[in-house]
Amino acid sequence: MTQSTPILIGHRGARGEAPENTLQGFEWAWRNGIHSFEFDLQLSSDNEIYILHDEDLARTCGVSGRAADRTLAELVTLDARKVGPPWPVECHIPALKDVLDLLLQAPDSVEQVQLEVKSTDTNTLMRLCDQLTTMLGELPPNLLEKCVVTSFHPLVPQLVQKAGVKGLRQGLAVEVEKVLQALLKTPSPPYDIVALNHQMVSREVVDQLRAKGLAVSTWTVNASQDWQRVCDAGVDSVITDYPLRMQQILQDRF
């Protein structure tokens, strides 16, 4: 890729090409050359961090109940391949440690890891962020500097910043126009990265955010014409459900 090409990031691993947010999905994408990811973090009933987008288990695992009501040991045994492309083997909900161990296999090849903390009650957010920053703070610098903790909840970046982990960045995810407009009016936003819904991306918006010292990421970009549009707008990274397919398109184009 050329220098002007944004970082390509697999959404929930490689959501359109392998079962989302599963250990086997991450491993498959990694083996196929995708080393930058976005994924979702939640807290189990025994205060362990696991990777799952939904609050409940019905869509991905086909079982009833809230994921947060189960222990990590229970969660990692569940088969989460109910959605996504057909898959020949069971695909399990991963603990955060499992995916960090995968990234540690080749940290220098990772360009960016966006760890999205799902919105929940304040007490849970505080416990999750405390554990998360402790775990990330133990990473070697060549991986830690690639990590960005994001959330739609504005409290999360504050908690990450308060933890004082040197080199760990924080970001705000945005999909509501009034939130974006408020951000554009803020003289010095307390973030490093803003992750925008791709429909909100324009050259004017990117330029304004860049002028505030913010990097700009965008999600979820699955069509080649949308990729071209956000590239032309000057974003720094692009999250896609189809990282292998998009990687091939970029190789052919650049």
Image (tube, rainbow, N blue to C red):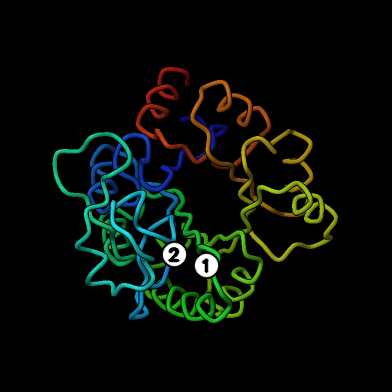
Residue at point 33%, 50% (across, down): 60
Q: Element at badge 1?
A: loop
Is 205 above or below relative to 118? above
> Badge 1 local density, few (<14 within 10 Å), some, or many (20+)?
many
Spot occupied by residue 102 in the image (x, y as percentages of width and height)? 27, 56
Q: Secondary structure at mark 2?
A: helix
- Residue at point 64% right, 73% down? 158
Amino acid at the residue labelled 2 = Leu
- In the rendered image, which quarter is residue 41 located in? bottom left
Q: Name the residue located 59 percent from the left edge and 70 percent from the top edge.
A: 156
Q: Position of residue 80 (x, y in %)?
A: 27, 51
Residue placed furthest toward the front: 64
Residue extending farthest to the top is 252
Q: Amino acid at mark 1?
A: Leu
Closer to us: 72 or 135: 72
Q: Is 224 placed above or below 11 here?
A: above
In the rendered image, the vertical position of residue 247 relative to residue 147, given as above or below: above
**Depth check, front residue: 94 or 109:** 94
What residue sits 78% from the left and 55% below the top?
183
Q: Could you classify mark 2 by the number of other residues whose Cα lies within 10 Å: few (under 14), some (14-19), or many (20 or more)?
A: many
Q: Mark 1 and 2 residues: CB-CB less than 8 Å, in contact?
A: yes
Q: Within the image, what quadrant is residue 185 found in?
A: bottom right
Q: Is residue 149 above or below residue 15?
A: below
Task: Specify the label residue 66 is tagged with.
Answer: none
Give the mark nearer the N terminus: 1 vs 2. 2
Residue 144 numbered mark, or none = 2
Q: Is residue 188 left or right of residue 33?
A: right
**Mark 1–mark 2 distance (CA, rounded to whole Å):** 6 Å
State which quarter of the image contains the N terminus: top left
Residue 43 x %, y %: 41, 72
Q: Which residue is mark 1?
A: 168
